[in-house]
Amino acid sequence: MATYAQWAKSLKTPKVSWVCGEDSVLVEATVADIKQRISAQALDSVMLVAGEVPDAEIWAALNQYAMDPAARRFLLVRQAQKIKGWEQFQSWLQQSRQMPSMYVCFVSADADFPYTEQDSKKVLDTPVAQIKGRGAIVRCAGTEAEITAYVQSRLKITSSDLKVLLVRTGYSTARVKDVVGKILALGVQPTEDVIRRLCAENGTEDVVEALFYQRKQEALRIATRLDKTEASKVIGKCAVVLDYMEHLYPAVLSGSPLWEVVARGFVPDYPARLWWGAAKHFDPISREKARTALLVADHGAGVGGEGALEALIGLW
């Protein structure tokens, strides 16, 4: 069992792995690391989504040999928590030495590993318990240690400059990833001055995105690390997006194309693309509830009280 920070220090190339966690950036970073370590060719790298294909198709893919007998084959299974029957996987695991070139990574959308109660103790459920003994299981929670490991695996950065990066991004892995990517693309040193120039916002956009995409735990995690003065920015951005939802929700409900909504001039192209996937959650009743939450939070922020963002997230 490993956190992302522990995984980043590992040199393993696991034959079978399970990756989960609420921090999608670190989940994808882990998957990218696994793929890179396996180094399967394009024709021998397959991705399937559980729930969109029958379980039998996943197990059939798992039992295929690489096109080149000397090369490795990699199967990536997303939404692994939706797989209903694991019997064929357990059989494969017992006989996997017969297919030494086959590697598989299961990615779960759950925040944690699956557990069961045994003798009043919480133990790992099948198949994760079996995978733990044969490969790697990684949970990405987005803690400070994990974000630090993510940055240090990509940049040579001093501890003081790292702290500036974390604070200026609001400890949001999405924003950290964006800044790290810019630093690498520009080929500059990650000094405090460079970091401050690249961090125009302080994590407020990530709180808003997490709220509208129904990821309240992520929103709360980022919000608790923001300065209380950022509350007004979050509230203002939420109000703007709610206005967009009045036009996006009916379009999504009726099946209208995105370009048609943009053509009407009510929602600009970029915001329409950004919030299109969240619009289904915001019918008139949900929008009214959200506006009430904004009013409560705005009052708290206006009188300088602590916890305005926490109140907003709790009422959202």
Image (cartoon, helix red, strand yellow):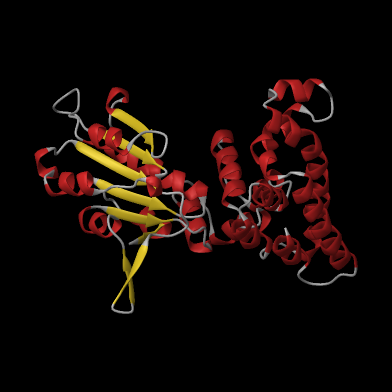
Question: Camera-side residue: 37 or 49?
Answer: 49
Locate residue 5: give its quadrant: bottom left
User: Percent position (x, y) of residue 293?
Assistant: 80, 59
Up/down of 140 relative to 255, above or below: below
Q: Residue at x 39, y 59 (%)?
A: 113
User: Percent position (x, y) of residue 276?
Assistant: 68, 34
Question: Camera-side residue: 247 or 103?
Answer: 247
Up/down of 146 relative to 205, above or below: below
Can residue 13 be seen here? The reply is no
Up/down of 198 relative to 312, above or below: above
* Quadrant showing the N terminus: bottom left
Locate residue 120: give its quadrant: bottom left
Q: How many marks?
A: 0
* Quadrant showing the C terminus: bottom right
Q: Residue at x 84, y 25 (%)?
A: 265
Q: Residue at x 53, y 62 (%)?
A: 144
Q: Of all residues shown, which one is farthest toward the bottom?
A: 120
User: Is 230 displayed left or right of 210 in the figure?
Assistant: right
User: Percent position (x, y) of residue 42?
Assistant: 32, 24
Q: Of all residues shown, which one is farthest toward the left?
A: 98
User: Percent position (x, y) of residue 83?
Assistant: 35, 45
Up/down of 205 relative to 267, above or below: below
